[in-house]
Structures are given as C-alpha cells and as structure tokens.
Image (cartoon, helix red, strand yellow):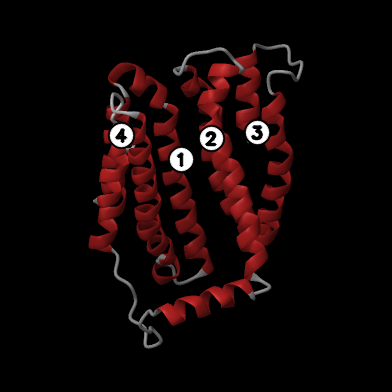
Amino acid sequence: LPLAVVCFLLWCPPEKAPDTIRIIYAAAVCQGYFLFYGLVVTPYLALLPEIGNTPHERLNLTTGQGVATLAGTLVFALSGLIIQQFGYPALGLVLALAVLISFYPTTVFIREQPSSERTKGSLTGLFRWMWEVLTNRDFLPLLVGTSFYWFALNLLLMLVPRWVEVRLDLSDAAVTWLMLPFIATNLVGFFFFNWLARKVGKFASLMLVFALSGIVFCLFGWSDQLGLPVSPLVGAQFVCGLA
C-alpha cells in the first residue's frame, strides 16, 4: 500500500508551489518510491526458488514474470493517450492500482517453505552477506553484467517519450505507436527464449541476449539517420522491434 500511494504521488506534484517546496517534494517522493520498491520487489523475487522446485518450473515462472512485465510495458505505451485524455494524476492512479493488483495476491496465495536453516537478520549478518556477494567469483560478474544491462534498457525506455518529441517531432500519442513493435516482438521473444534456454542452456541464451543487445541498443541513436526508405517513425519502430 505505501508503494502504491507513492506511485500515485509521483504524478501529483504541487505545481504552483515555490521552487523549494517542489524540489523537496520531488526528492522525498522519489526516495520513498525507491525505498518502498526495494522493500516490496526484493523479497518478491526472492520467493522464486521457494515456489519453483525444479529449474524447469523456475524457467516457466520467470517467463510468466516476463509476460507480466510486458503488460506493464503496454500500459507505458498507452501512457501518452492516458495523459492527453485524463492528465498525469490519472496515470498515477493506474500505476497505483496496478501495484495493488499485482502484489497483494502474493500475500494471500503464496506460502514460503519452512526451513531449518533460516536465521534472524542482523546488522552484522548484513555486512557479512554483502562481503560474500562481493567475493563470489561466480555471482559477481552476473550481478555486474545484468545491472548494466537493465540500466541500459530502462534508460532507453525512459528516453522514448523525449526521443519522440525532440528527434521525431511528434506528439506524446506517438509513443504508443513507437512501442507497439517492441511489445509484439517481446511477447514472442519470451516464449522463444524459454524454448532456447531448455535447448542450449540459460548461460548461452543470456550471452546471446547481451551480444545482440549491445549492437541493437546502439542503433537507437541513429534510428532516424539509417537511410531507410521509410518515415523516421517507421525507422524508429523497426529499431524498437529489434530491441
């Protein structure tokens, strides 16, 4: 519930207040968002090995999470239309309701498996666990690699509205049309990589994603200068589809 409230407040700033008040509001609400997001999502993701008993089950669960993420991306793609019709507070309300609908069923239907190895948390234990992560030669490269990947992907997604407005000289509504190929190929991709991971392994599939993403993400900077015999919007849609 606190995360949902903060998600709504993000889109309802005191526009007519003095600059200082607006800066304090933005800083407080943004920090509250990241705090509550971490408090909700971290244990939610940690439940995966608890409810998936085999690698195959966990692969299917993550595919389901991917499809659900796609649904969120669809709402993002429609955000331009929502803002134009109803304003920013309406988008905040949609986001808040999505948070409640997404996470509250977990508290009712999912039960963590009992474990004799579970220990009480402590500040000393926290630093010990952080040190174990930083010195784990298998996990640390994965942590660094996936962190940079998600940073790049989310940065691109956040820049899409600005890209549409500044480089393509179109309205916010065009964001929806730009994101449609991204969503369509994503939907196919989740099931394709579920199949591919079972055939060649998760590691090889992940390396393939990293390699192709490194090439395709760079194309965003030149999507309107590739010399394609189409409009700049269609060229950008082509790059979005590849991404």
Q: Is residue 86 left or right of residue 72?
A: left
Q: For the point 70% across and 58% down, which residue is it?
A: 204
Check if mark 3's residue and mark 2's residue have beta carbons within 8 Å.
no
Residue at label 4? 92
Q: Compared with residue 232, is residue 176 higher up or lower down, i.e. above or below?
A: below
Secondary element type, mark 1: helix
| Label located before the other in sequence (3 or 2) | 2
Residue at label 2? 157
What amino acid is labelled 2 in the image?
Answer: Leu
- The span from disc 4 to disc 3 (Cα, nearest Å) is 30 Å
Visible residue check, residue 97: yes
Q: Compared with residue 161, is residue 64 higher up or lower down, i.e. above or below?
A: below
- The span from disc 1 to disc 4 (Cα, nearest Å) is 18 Å
Q: Is residue 227 left or right of residue 74?
A: right
Secondary element type, mark 3: helix
Q: Residues within 10 Å of mark 1 (few under 14, many from 20)?
A: some
What amino acid is labelled 4 in the image?
Answer: Gly
| Label located before the other in sequence (3 or 1) | 1
Along the line of sight, which residue is nearer the eye, 154 or 34?
34
Q: Nearer the viewer, mark 4 or mark 3?
A: 4
- The span from disc 3 to disc 2 (Cα, nearest Å) is 14 Å
| Label located before the other in sequence (2 or 4) | 4
Along the line of sight, which residue is nearer the eye, 135 or 104?
135
| Label located before the other in sequence (4 or 3) | 4
Residue at label 1? 70
Q: For the point 48% across and 63% down, which residue is it?
A: 58
Q: Position of residue 102 (x, y in %)?
A: 31, 49
Secondary element type, mark 4: helix
Residue at label 3? 242
Q: Nearer the viewer, mark 2 or mark 1?
A: 2
